[in-house]
Image: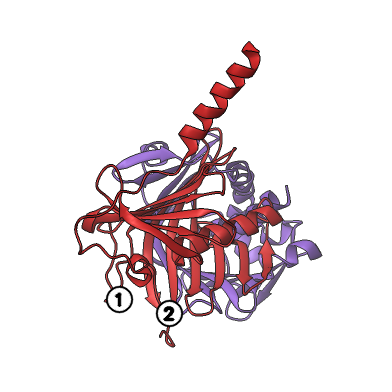
Chain colours: A red, B purple
Amino acid sequence: MKQNLFLLCILCLTTACSGLPKVYPDRNLSWPVRRPQCANLFPEGRWQFSHAIEAEMPGGRKGMLIGVTLISSTDKTIQSIIMTIEGMVLFEARYDRRLVVNRGIPPFDAENFARGLIQDIQLIFFAPPGTLIESGVLDNGAAVCRFQNPDKGYVDIIQHGPGGWEIRQYDRRYHKRRSIKAILNKGGINPGRFNVPGRLTLTSHDTPGYVLKMDLIEAVPLKDNK
Amino acid sequence: MQKTRIYHLFLCAVILASAGLCLGWADTWDDIKAASGKVTAIRAEFVQEKHMKILVRPLVSQGMFYFKAPRSLRWEYRSPIQSILLTHGGKTRRFIRKDGKVSEDAGAQLPAVQMVLHEITQWLKGRFDENPMFSSHLEPGPKVVLRPKEKKFAGMIQRIELILADRPGMIRSVTIFEGEDSFTRLRFKKVVLNPPLPDDLFGKI
């Protein structure tokens, strides 16, 4: 009986800790509640982004790489290249409804790696594919839009004023899977349509997790950008 | 393991070129070896361009390269990433400078780099034709072409082309082809042969 009670307490605590942050109604009518405005921090059209990526892996190991990402917000295609500082390509893949890995040098040849990378890129660069279910403010007053995706998971897009934004991804059981923090004014650029963050920090809350600190090298709108 | 070896080969080519080793200015390997013996130190600026078909423009990195015989090296990228590879006294370390802080990069590549550095001493003697991993050809240009002997390596690095400068002991550029539409080109400028280089340069950030 005592054991059951203990387990029940643990369950309650776990549920409480992993719940979605509460969204409060926003009395300021200027805060958008329409989907396009919630998603206006994502690039539109075709872009090529280059980042210096500092990867922090389990055990505290760190490594520096260069990542090049070509995206199209229209057809949701992605091309991803990861290379060493010296220019050697370790990984190259294309996603167009299905994933094709053209080059993968161990340990970048693992299928899980490629799939996870594409999912991370989608989270960073594409507006959530799901439905806007809630908008308002968080405890700290930050504006938030909450989407529910087709996989029943949730994505919160949080705007911390003019200096940055944040994305939090939760699974259907409200466990936080990824968070992305963007700093706009740290070497970022504003090509006129949206602010390209100078730094993105992606944290995987899975076990084992990882952290990717991505500093923008350049953002190039591609010719047929629409 | 394969990644390490490939990376090793890649670095071999880069360091070889960067070092501006004593190639060419002759028609035979023997002439190259003879000229090579005169280089004891090198200082150079480099520009690295990464070309790929899908890139709308090449990715450009720049930095400085220092070498001091027998095997001290400082390979310093200054942009866009500030990275410093130091080898001295048999130890190799890589550091990243970011946000005003310096941290050590514990990448798995380092053991491979150490292996490369051992081979550099061979290359310093102009023994490019003695590396068992590559077949080497001296072509008009003058140009040295290295091709991996093993097929699985050739899938990663197709060939390496080194264009020799007019001045003995200097290389104009090196191009590492990973495929026909993917290559890395390093161009060297302001190359100084046998400058006085203090040991601290290779031991301190």
Q: Nearer the viewer, residue B37 or B201?
A: B201
Return the mark for residue A193: 1
Q: Residues within 10 Å of mark 1 (few under 14, many from 20)?
A: few
Q: Residue at x 80, y 65 (%)?
A: B151
Residue type, mark 2 in image: Gly
Image quarter where the C terminus of chain B lies is top left
Mark 1 and mark 2 residues within 8 Å of each other at the beta carbon: yes
B23 to the left or right of B84: right
Q: For numbered disc 2, what is the local secondary structure?
A: loop
Residue at screen point 57% across, 28% down: A11
* Same chain check for tags 1 and 2: yes
Q: Quadrant of residue B95?
A: top left
Give the residue pinned by disc 2. A45
Name the subunit of mark 1: A
Q: Is residue B182 left or right of residue B167?
A: right
Kind of residue indicated by mark 1: Arg
Horizontal and vertical percent position of residue A126:
46, 67
Circle 2 residues within 10 Å: few <14, some 14–19, many ≥20: some
- Residue B205 vs B18, above or below: the answer is above
Q: Nearer the viewer, residue B157 or A225?
A: A225
* B178 or A218, nearer to the observer: A218
Residue A154, compared with residue A208, is above or below; it is below
As drawn, B160 above or below A56: below
